[in-house]
Image (cartoon, grey):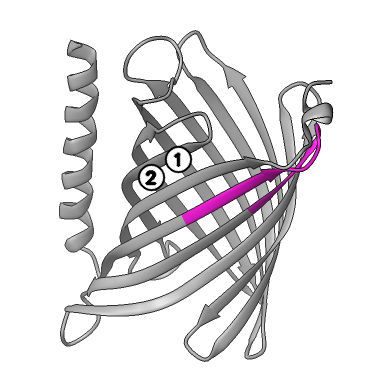
Amino acid sequence: MCNRYIRFICIGIMYFYLIHTATSQTEFSSGLLPEITFSTKISDRFKLIHAVESRQIITDNTKENSFNYDYILTDFTTLLSTKVGASGVLNLGYLFRVEEDQIIHRSIQQYNIVQLLRRGRIGHRVATDQTFTNNEAPEFRLRYRITLEKPLTGDEIDPKEFYIKLGNEYLTSFQQDETDLEIRILPFLGYEINKKSKIEIGPDYRISGFSESGSSHKLWLSIGWFYAFDTRNKEQHTK
C-alpha cells in the first residue's frame, strides 16, 4: 500500500515539475488529446486496430491570447496486426489526418515485443512512418518507445483494477535537409473495466526543436478508451 502512494506522489511531482519547466521555455502549449481505439480479432494470428484521435489546444504562449480553445486536427488510423514469434507483434497501417483545410497521409510500420515480469510487463516498440502532404516535402520518422505496465494491486492486471503505465519515446524526423529530435514522457493511470475494455489517462509531455535556438514544449492531457472485439466464430475460437 505504501509503495502505491509513493508511485502516485512521484508521478505528481514529475507532472508539476514538467509544467513549471515547460512554461519557462520559448514555446509552450497545452491541451486535450482524447482517443478511442477498437481492435478486432479476425483470426488466431491477425487483428485490425482502428483509432480516432483528436487534438485541441487550450493554452499557447506564442499567441497574443495564450488562453484560448482551438481545435487542431483529427487522426484516423487503421493497422493490421500480426503475431511474430512468441512475444513479437508486427503492425502495418495507414493514418488519415484532417488538419484545417489539409489532408495528410501517413504510412506506418511498427514492431512490438513484450517482456513479462513477475508483476507487470515491459514493452518495446520500434517504428517508422512516412508523412505526405501536398504543400510540404515528405517527412520520415524513426521511433523507439519503452513502456512499463504494473498493477497497483496483485501480480496481474485484472478487471476492475487500476494500473500504472509509464512510457518514454524518442522520435527522430527527417524532412528535406532538416532533422529534429522529439522526446515524449507518458506517465498514465489505467483502469481495466473488463477483459475487453480499459481506460487510460495522464499527461503526454513532448519536447522538440533541439536543433533550433529555442525548444518547443507541448503538454497534452491524454484520455484513451480501448475496446477489443472478437469476430471469430465459436468453432474457430475453441480450436
Magenta span dominant secondary structure: strand
Q: Which residue is mark 2?
A: 185
What amino acid type is highlighted by mark number 2? Ile
Of the two numbered discs 1 and 2 on the same chain, state the one appearing first in sequence: 1
Is the C terminus in the top left, top right, bottom left or bottom right quadrant?
top right
Question: Amino acid type of disc 1?
Answer: Asn
Residue 215 percent location from the top left of the image: 35, 65
The foreground one among 93 and 38 is: 38
- x and y percentages locating residue 137 in the rendered image: 67, 82
| Residue holding disc 1 | 168
Percent coordinates x, y for residue 109 in the rendering: 73, 52
Q: Tell me what residue is drawn at x 18 percent, y 37 percent.
A: 12
Q: Is residue 128 left or right of residue 208?
A: right
Q: Which residues, given as a range, are shown in magenta?
A: 36-49
Q: Is residue 44 magenta?
A: yes
Question: Is 12 a magenta residue?
Answer: no
